[in-house]
């Protein structure tokens, strides 16, 4: 016989529920999306999780949608649950994005996360969040599992020195924005990732890089990969230059090296 482990309640007394201080922000966009889903598909049975203080651990978007529509909610009580359990629940699913974890930890007063939040606030709209995360990760790509795992676990280190260094890089990348905005039908983060890689290659002169790309702006076309963007910008950088740098070749070398390192780690872990 199955064991009953939780009781689900139904109520229209929505004022008794409270938002957990360090939980992610409830954006109007997310609430609107839930409201639209309810209007199109009907009310979907999905209980909120609250603690004994009626602080919402999971389901604050659903709560706000129900308030706006004058509906009831279903909920279950998880005694003793708090922000720690809330974060843990969302580390293994797609409900929380990186910015949700950053916001949550910044509310705890952790300076590393406050720094990242401020960087995203200042440059996110112009450069895109993925570009900011790539800069804070110290890489031209932001998809490394360790980086994301550290953000989600609250272990990321991003002190004031790292913040100032990253802010200077963001300001440099902003000088490319008017150029990149003119390239239609192209993912802008790939263009920024390409520049981030090139500017860190030995011998690259950042002033020459921006000037040469500005001069060659008319020749820039939409690309679909970072490598294609590097190759395109390499032509601009090396045009009529006696000190050519082969960025694409260096990119391929580093890419191959990264693959070999990943294979070695996988083999060490699995024995395969």
Image: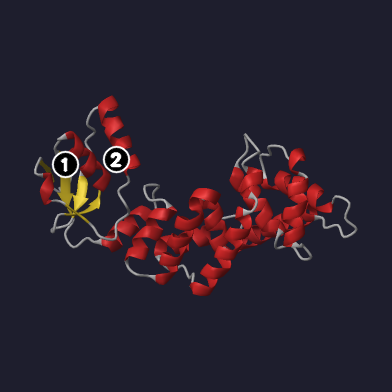
Q: Position of residue 82 (x, y in %)?
A: 24, 61
* Structure colour scheme: secondary structure
Considering only vertical position in the picture, is 244 above or below 235? below
Q: Closer to the observer: label 2 or label 1?
A: 2
Question: Which residue is pictured at 62% across the width and 34% down the height?
Answer: 185
Left or right of 149 in this view: 272: right
**Label 2 – label 1 distance at C-alpha:** 17 Å
Q: Quadrant of the rendered structure where residue 262 is? A: bottom right
Question: Disc 2 designates what residue?
Answer: 31
Instruction: Residue 131: give x, y in percent of width and height.
Output: 56, 53
Location of residue 164 in the rendering, given as x and y in whole percent from the top left corner:
54, 69
Q: Is residue 72 left or right of residue 252?
A: left
In the image, taking residue 116 as reference, residue 41 lies left or right, namely left
Q: Secondary structure at mark 2?
A: helix
For residue 248, above or below residue 168? above
Identify the disc placed on residue 74: 1
Element under label 1? strand
């Amino acid at each position: 016989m199955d064991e009953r482990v939780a009781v689900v309640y139904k109520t229209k007394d929505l004022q008794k529920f409270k938002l957990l201080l360090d939980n992610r922000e409830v954006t109007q966009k997310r609430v609107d999306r839930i409201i639209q889903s309810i209007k199109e598909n009907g009310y979907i049975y999905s209980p909120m999780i609250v603690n004994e203080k009626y602080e919402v651990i999971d389901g604050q978007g659903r709560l706000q949608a129900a308030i706006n529509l004058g509906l009831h909610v279903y909920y279950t009580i998880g005694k003793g649950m708090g922000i720690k359990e809330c974060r843990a629940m969302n580390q293994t699913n797609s409900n929380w994005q990186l910015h949700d974890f950053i916001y949550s930890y910044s509310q705890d007063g952790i300076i590393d996360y406050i720094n990242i939040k401020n960087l995203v606030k200042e440059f996110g709209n112009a450069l895109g969040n993925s570009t900011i995360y790539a800069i804070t990760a110290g890489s031209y790509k932001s998809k490394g599992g360790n980086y994301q795992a550290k953000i989600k676990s609250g272990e990321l280190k991003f002190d004031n020195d790292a913040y100032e260094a990253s802010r200077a890089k963001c300001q440099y990348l902003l000088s490319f924005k008017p150029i990149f905005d003119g390239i239609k039908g192209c993912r802008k983060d790939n263009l920024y990732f390409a520049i981030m890689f090139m500017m860190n290659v030995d011998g690259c002169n950042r002033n020459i890089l921006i000037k040469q790309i500005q001069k060659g702006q008319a020749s820039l076309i939409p690309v679909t990969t970072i490598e294609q963007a590097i190759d395109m910008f390499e032509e601009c950088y090396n045009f009529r230059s006696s000190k050519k740098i082969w960025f694409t070749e260096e990119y391929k070398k580093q890419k191959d090296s990264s693959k070999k390192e990943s294979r070695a780690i996988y083999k060490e872990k699995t024995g395969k």
